[in-house]
């Protein structure tokens, strides 16, 4: 059975090369890297062989079998066509007690932009074309960890709400991150002025705060698992930490201020909360997946880009 092509790998490479040339403020990549570092901070072991997950154009991972103690990925796996296959390759590259840690966009990422372009296109052209990539639900992503054979799979989500002065500032950030439209079925024609104006108007009417700033949601999903579908002795501490976190939300508070000459101040204005459910699984294996079916998880952070 062939894997459906959702993303154009050549377009992705071009977008990321352009992002590297722009060298913009990678604040969300830093947020994701900090999240991975926080999770690694609770692991009391030394990782001798570390794999930074990089795929070729065919989404193959150049790594030997059971060769690595740790495999990590920061904001790249959400644009993979065959994520189950890639996760299987990662698991096979890990030693039986090796650790996998990844951060990727998921959930309701860019929901405001998706809705605004859809409404604008219906009004202007009478139809909708794919402009925003599909993002995986945290429970579905946790299920993929189990499917790939990881032990102690954990999937949790942290939300960052970014507030922009105008829509073009958001587009510039997406371009600087290499996250503009790379869907295979995307419309290759430039966005018309009428469509851009309609999308801007819809965004401002539906997703602006009292101060007129436009909010943009970014859900970062963190995936964690051990290299084999069994529970080695080294995992006992990890299971205890998961059990402690399963009964409710953990809080961490941070305040920082950083300056980007191009975009003005970037300020974290709230603390953060990570929502997790207790161990649960459709297949019966142990796991921990964030449950957002009840009270919504509040923003993990709010960033202003003036």
Image (cartoon, grey):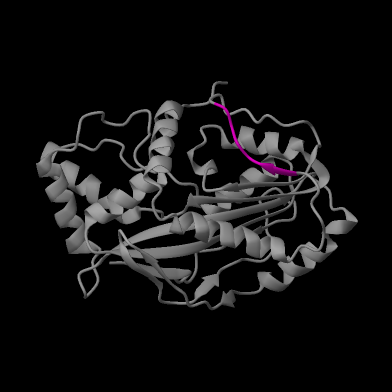
Residue drawn at x 71%, y 51% is 225
Residue 270 falls inside the magenta stretch: no
Q: Quadrant of residue 296?
A: bottom left
Q: Can residue 182 be seen at all in this image of the molecule?
A: yes
Q: Answer left or right for 186 relative to 226.
A: left
Q: Residue at x 63, y 40 (%)?
A: 53
Quarter holding the N terminus is: top right
Residue in the picture at 26% in, 55% down: 169
Residue 152 point in image, percent of width and height: 75, 54
Q: Is residue 247 above or below residue 73?
A: below
Left or right, residue 141 beside residue 125: right
Q: Is residue 177 above or below residue 306?
A: above
Assess whether residue 53 is covered by the magenta stretch.
Answer: yes
Q: Position of residue 145 (x, y in %)?
A: 66, 46
Residue 265 horizontal/vertical position (percent): 34, 69
Answer with left or right where residue 21 lies relative to residue 222: left
Of the pair 1 and 250, the residue shown nearer to us: 250
Residue 87 higher or lower than 286, as above or below: above
Numbered label tally: 0
Which residue appears farthest toward the front when viewing the image?
A: 261
Relative vertical location of residue 251 with respect to residue 277 in this rendering, above or below:
below
Residue 271 versus residue 242: which sits nearer the camera? 271
Residue at 25% across, 71% down: 209
Furthest-top residue in view?
1
Residue 25 placement (x, y as % from top left): 40, 56
Figure quadrant of the C terminus: bottom left
User: Which residues are the magenta region?
Assistant: 50-56
The answer to whether residue 299 shows anywhere in this view is: no
């Amino acid at each position: 059975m062939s894997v459906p092509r959702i993303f154009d790998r050549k377009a992705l490479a071009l977008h990321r090369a352009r992002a590297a040339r722009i060298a913009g403020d990678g604040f969300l990549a830093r947020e994701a890297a900090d999240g991975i570092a926080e999770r690694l901070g609770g692991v009391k072991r030394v990782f001798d062989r570390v794999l930074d997950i990089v795929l070729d154009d065919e989404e193959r991972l150049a790594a030997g079998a059971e060769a690595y103690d740790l495999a990590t990925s920061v904001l790249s796996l959400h644009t993979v066509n065959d994520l189950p296959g890639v996760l299987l390759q990662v698991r096979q590259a890990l030693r039986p007690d090796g650790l996998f840690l990844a951060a990727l966009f998921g959930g309701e990422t860019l929901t405001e932009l998706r809705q605004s372009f859809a409404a604008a296109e219906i009004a202007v052209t009478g139809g909708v074309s794919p402009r925003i990539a599909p993002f995986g639900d945290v429970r579905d992503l946790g299920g993929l960890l189990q499917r790939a054979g990881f032990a102690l799979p954990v999937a949790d989500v942290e939300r960052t709400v970014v507030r922009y002065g105008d829509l073009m500032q958001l587009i510039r950030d997406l371009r600087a991150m290499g996250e503009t439209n790379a869907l295979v079925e995307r419309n290759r024609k430039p966005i018309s002025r009428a469509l851009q104006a309609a999308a801007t108007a819809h965004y401002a009417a539906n997703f602006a705060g009292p101060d007129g700033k436009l909010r943009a949601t970014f859900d970062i999903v963190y995936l964690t698992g051990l290299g084999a579908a069994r529970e080695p002795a080294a995992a006992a501490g990890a299971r205890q930490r998961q059990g402690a976190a399963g009964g409710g939300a953990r809080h961490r508070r941070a305040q920082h201020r950083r300056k980007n000459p191009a975009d003005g101040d970037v300020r974290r204005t709230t603390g953060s909360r990570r929502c997790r459910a207790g161990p649960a699984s459709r297949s019966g294996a142990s796991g921990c997946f964030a449950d957002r079916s009840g009270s919504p998880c509040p923003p993990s952070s709010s960033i202003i880009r003036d």
